[in-house]
Amino acid sequence: MSPNNATITQNDQTLTFEKPTVEDGSAMWELVDNSTLDQNSPYKYIMMCEFFSETCIVAKQEDQLVGFVTAFIPPEKSDVLFIWQVGTDTSQQGKGVASRLLNELLTREGCEDVHYVEATVTPSNKASQSLFKRLARDHNTNCEVSECFSEELFPGDNHEEEETYRIGPFSK
């Protein structure tokens, strides 16, 4: 098994955590299309797999994509991993897959200089709020929440403000 893959068996289910490939992009898009997550273009998911595979991760069960994280290291913040999107298939929700994806990603070589995780989360997204607070608890570190993008910045009337969750510092 390569250093970019990990296999975990839990409750007779084997999940494999892998670096994504461009072939995973459409499955990521479909998972989001069947969820309440903000939908991006299929191109975004393929592009993330191609150009940001070191900071993205997928979970598969029997070669079916059941979860993913898209993330990148901002050029101005080389010690930060910015989480763009976390998605899990409904069959995996409540099983800790999202937490395992984040923790596995943080062990990757591409994240060896990461000391903070940041993500933007809407006030109504309780699942993501819990996920990032749990990440902080699991690593015995801080989770700071601050204003980021006001709802006035978004076109239309149906997007809440986004708050920044900053978790860290992580000790390596």
Image (cartoon, rainbow, N blue to C red):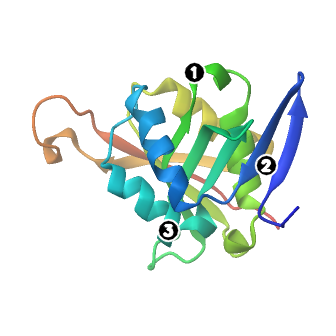
Comparing 74 with 21, the one in front is 21
Q: Percent from the top left, x then y, of residue 93?
A: 63, 23
First along the sequence among labels 1 and 2: 1
Comparing 115 with 51, the one in front is 51
Q: Give the residue type that dot 2 points to.
A: His
Tell whether 172 sits left or right of 93.
right
Q: Could you tell me if the residues under marks 1 and 3 are in contact, i.e. CB atoms within 8 Å?
A: no
Mark 2 → mark 3, Cα distance in angstroms:
29 Å
Q: Could you tell me if the residues under marks 2 and 3 are in contact, i.e. CB atoms within 8 Å?
A: no
Label 3, secondary structure: give it: helix
Q: What residue sits 35% from the left and 50% below the top?
A: 42
Q: Which residue is mark 1?
A: 90
Mark 1 → mark 3, Cα distance in angstroms:
26 Å
- Which numbered disc covers residue 139? 2
First along the sequence among labels 1 and 3: 3
User: For mark 1, does the 10 Å Cα neighbourhood hold few (<14), some (14 to 19), or many (20 or more) residues?
Assistant: few
Q: What residue sits 64% from the left and 48% below the top?
A: 58
Q: Nearer the viewer, mark 2 or mark 3?
A: 3
Label 2, secondary structure: give it: loop
User: For mark 2, does the 10 Å Cα neighbourhood hold few (<14), some (14 to 19), or many (20 or more) residues?
Assistant: some
Q: Quadrant of residue 156?
A: top left
Q: Give the residue type that dot 3 points to.
A: Glu
First along the sequence among labels 2 and 3: 3
Q: Which residue is mark 3?
A: 50
Q: What residue sits 66% from the left and 69% below the top?
A: 114
Q: Nearer the viewer, mark 1 or mark 3?
A: 3
Q: Quadrant of residue 116?
A: bottom right
